[in-house]
Amino acid sequence: MERLQLDFNNMMQGQIGPHGLTDGDLAAIAPRVLAAQRTFMEQRGQGMMGWTSLPYEQGAVVEEILAYAQDIRARGIRNFVVLGIGGSSLGPIAVHQALNHLHYNELPDEKRPGPRLYVEDNIDPERMRALMDIIDVRETVFNVISKSGNTSETTSQFLIIRHALKEALGQDYASHIVCTTSRDSGSLVKIARAEGFRLFAIPDGVGGRFSETCPVGLLPAAVCGIDIASLLAGAADMDKRCQQQDMHQNPAMMAAALSVLSMEKGMNISVMMPYADSLRYVADWYAQLWGESLGKLKDTRGNIVRAGQTPVKSLGVTDQHSQLQLYAEGPQDKVITFLAVGDYRTGMPIPKDGVGIESTDFLCGHSLEELIQAERKATAYALTRAGQMNMTITLPTLNAHTLGQLLYYFQVQTALTGFMLGVDPFDQPGVENSKNATYAMLGRAGYDDKRRELEQAPKAEEKYRI
Ligand code: PA5
């Protein structure tokens, strides 16, 4: 089996100097990470840890999804549009980019394993209009994804699309909408039942940012021809590694220990830097997982802790020419995680015929894969010499199985880190205030108190506007 590998040499004093971690630090934190791992084992499959069961319990769901994906192709549907936001969109985007052709939508129909995929995760009116300019809704299926079934952004997109479909197709409109939402709660499931939309359920105990391996992610992936059974098998393999109690055998445990140790040493920033365009949106997905799960005002006992580590997305090699100067010489407040791929899925040789200038011709006969690997290693070396903490996660090759391992590894690392910090990694109370303020501004019933609160808030002063 191709296994994800975590190399954390460059977190250690022996490599980066006094600023680094020691074997003593690892030994000292071992009981805490073990306690977190025990919590993980005790709570698996319960409460908000339903996502730990997803790799094992979805045989029937996978069959249903594959049949639906086949049906979409048989109907000649040309576009599949996801309407969703946050945990309901970042996973589908990340998996699509990682496993499909990098110009998937531009491929001719016969070279694509499914319809074109669009994930509309914002409510910018120009973007929505632009989508409507390039698709024909009669050839399109819209997948409305919302765990709560009540999210304003997704609901407003849904209302726009429903109206457009009804105008174009009359009563046939319902076969162009498929909803992925909670089985029993929220408005979306009620609407879907009332109007006859196809429904896929988000299981209980699976929060938005932990939902990629349920129908939220599996449906769009399957429609585009991704091997979702392998994705789940990869997650299951990682889950087995994550059940081991020895942190030296369990990559998520080790990563959680390193994260907490680094935070305690003042590393307030976590830079995720894939050296593969295909993994660039995994960095976005990770940013939500890490930021929303750990960024908490209070711990589970109600003490003010202001926990968290700011996630930053970076892309190798592109951002070597943008952010690397800061990483090398700026504040020692960050951990850089490189995402490496052992073997790229395609080669691109650099031709042997040079131009007769040494500073150009030294590249001749090499390849882009050699160059990108050399630049990744050189960057890790340079950061290490600069005393900056960094580590490397390597996928031997990138496929559905190794991607499943990677996503699941990050989920367990996040849960364990949350437990070690004493916060609830599965809630997001800080997001509610902004949602409620939006409801109040748009006059939603039941938000009068919030409206009054907004009216009484300190007024902005002209002198601070120029
Ligand atoms: O991780 C989360 O819970 C959030 O980011 C949600 O996914 C996001 O707010 C969208 O919510 P919903 O899926 O309920 O529409």
Image: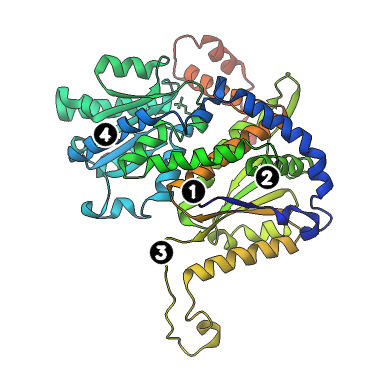
Q: Given this view, does label 3 or label 2 mark the residue nearer the observer?
A: 3
How much space separates mark 3 and mark 4, taking CA atoms? 31 Å
Residue 410 visible at all: no
Number of marks in the rendered image: 4
Q: Which residue is mark 2?
A: 269
Q: Given this view, does label 1 or label 2 mark the residue nearer the observer?
A: 1
Compared to residue 123, the image places residue 182 above or below, namely above
Residue flagged by tag 2: what amino acid is it?
Ile
Instruction: Left or right? Give the position of 271 relative to 307.
Output: left
Residue 14 visible at all: yes
Q: Which residue is mark 3?
A: 346
- Of the residues under marks 3 and 4, which one precedes in the sequence? 4
Q: Given this view, does label 2 or label 4 mark the residue nearer the observer?
A: 4
Instruction: Left or right? Give the position of 341 relative to 216.
Output: right
At horizontal 53% and vertical 45% (from top left) the residue drawn is 406
How much space separates mark 2 and mark 4, taking CA atoms? 43 Å
Circle 1 residues within 10 Å: few <14, some 14–19, many ≥20: many
Marks 3/1 in contact by CB < 8 Å: the verdict is no
Q: Quadrant of the C terminus?
A: top right
At horizontal 34% and vertical 55% (from top left) the residue drawn is 103
Instruction: Left or right? Give the position of 203 relative to 378.
Output: left
How much space separates mark 4 and mark 1, taking CA atoms? 24 Å
Residue 268 quadrant: top right
**Front one among 291 and 371:** 371
Q: Secondary structure at mark 4?
A: helix
Q: Which residue is mark 4?
A: 67
Q: Which residue is mark 1?
A: 402
Circle 2 residues within 10 Å: few <14, some 14–19, many ≥20: some
At horizontal 68% and vertical 56% (from top left) the residue drawn is 327
- Of the residues under marks 4 and 1, which one precedes in the sequence? 4
Residue flagged by tag 1: what amino acid is it?
Thr
Marks 4/1 in contact by CB < 8 Å: the verdict is no
